[in-house]
Image (tube, grey):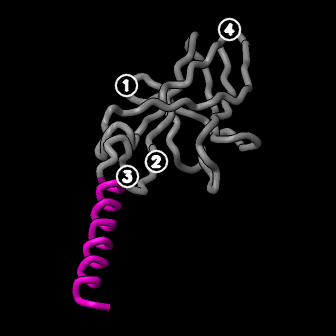
């Protein structure tokens, strides 16, 4: 091939590479998000419609509930730790047994809902950390 022919081929290939690069990198609607998964390892708060006299809980179904004590600030908090959590459980539901002083009892599994923390380190479209919302427990 003559030098002029090689120059035309090189210019053609170069133009094709530039056009492809512009096509790939100029798309404004797409964003590449890092492969990060967020996990919330904090406690689950239980909010009761009436103050219970006793509470026992554990994560997931078919678990053995353990007694939950009220925290110093007056909240019913279930930590993601033994004896409430036995690996390899995933924390999406909580089983609880609660009683009122009147004798009313409840034994039921509740879903654990999540909400974003409002922090989006890589942009809103990439998602971000979350936390559990309090589990509402109707008693009485």
- Which residues fall within the magenta stretch? 1-25
Point out the tag, 4 or 3, that comes first from the N-terminus: 3
Circle 2/circle 1 CB separation < 8 Å? no
- Could you say which quadrant of the image residue 21 lies in? bottom left
- Could you say which quadrant of the image residue 97 lies in? top right
Element at label 2 = loop
Query: Where is residue 75 drawn, in percent x and y?
Result: 45, 24
Q: Residues within 10 Å of mark 2 (few under 14, many from 20)?
A: few
Q: CA distance from mark 3 to mark 2?
A: 21 Å
In the depicted structure, whether residue 93 falls above or below residue 103: below
Q: Is residue 109 visible?
A: yes
Q: In the drawing, what numbered circle is on residue 48?
A: none
Q: CA distance from mark 2 to mark 4?
A: 34 Å
Query: Where is residue 110 drawn, in percent x and y?
Result: 66, 28
- Identify the residue at image location x=50%, y=34%: 44
Point out the tag, 3 or 2, that comes first from the N-terminus: 3
Circle 3/circle 1 CB separation < 8 Å? no
Does 20 appear in magenta? yes
Point out the tag, 3 or 1, that comes first from the N-terminus: 3
- Could you say which quadrant of the image residue 16 lies in? bottom left
Disc 3: which residue = 32
Query: Where is residue 7 drawn, in percent x and y?
Result: 23, 81
Q: CA distance from mark 3 to mark 1?
A: 43 Å
Residue 40 is left or right of residue 13, and the answer is right
Q: CA distance from mark 4 to mark 3?
A: 50 Å
Dot in front, 2 or 1: 2
Disc 2: which residue = 39
Q: In the drawing, what numbered circle is on residue 140?
A: 4
């Amino acid at each position: 091939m003559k030098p002029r022919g090689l120059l035309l081929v090189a210019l053609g290939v170069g133009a094709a590479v530039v056009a492809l690069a512009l096509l790939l990198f100029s798309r404004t609607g797409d964003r590449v998000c890092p492969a990060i998964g967020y996990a919330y390892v904090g406690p689950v708060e239980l909010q009761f419609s009436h103050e219970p006299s006793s509470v026992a809980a554990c994560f997931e179904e078919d678990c053995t509930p353990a007694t939950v004590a009220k925290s110093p600030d007056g909240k019913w908090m279930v930590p993601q730790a033994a004896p409430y959590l036995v690996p390899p459980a995933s924390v999406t539901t909580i089983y609880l047994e609660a009683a009122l002083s009147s004798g009313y009892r409840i034994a039921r599994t509740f879903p654990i809902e999540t909400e974003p923390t409002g922090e989006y380190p890589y942009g809103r479209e990439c998602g971000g950390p979350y936390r559990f919302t309090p589990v509402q427990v109707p008693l009485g």
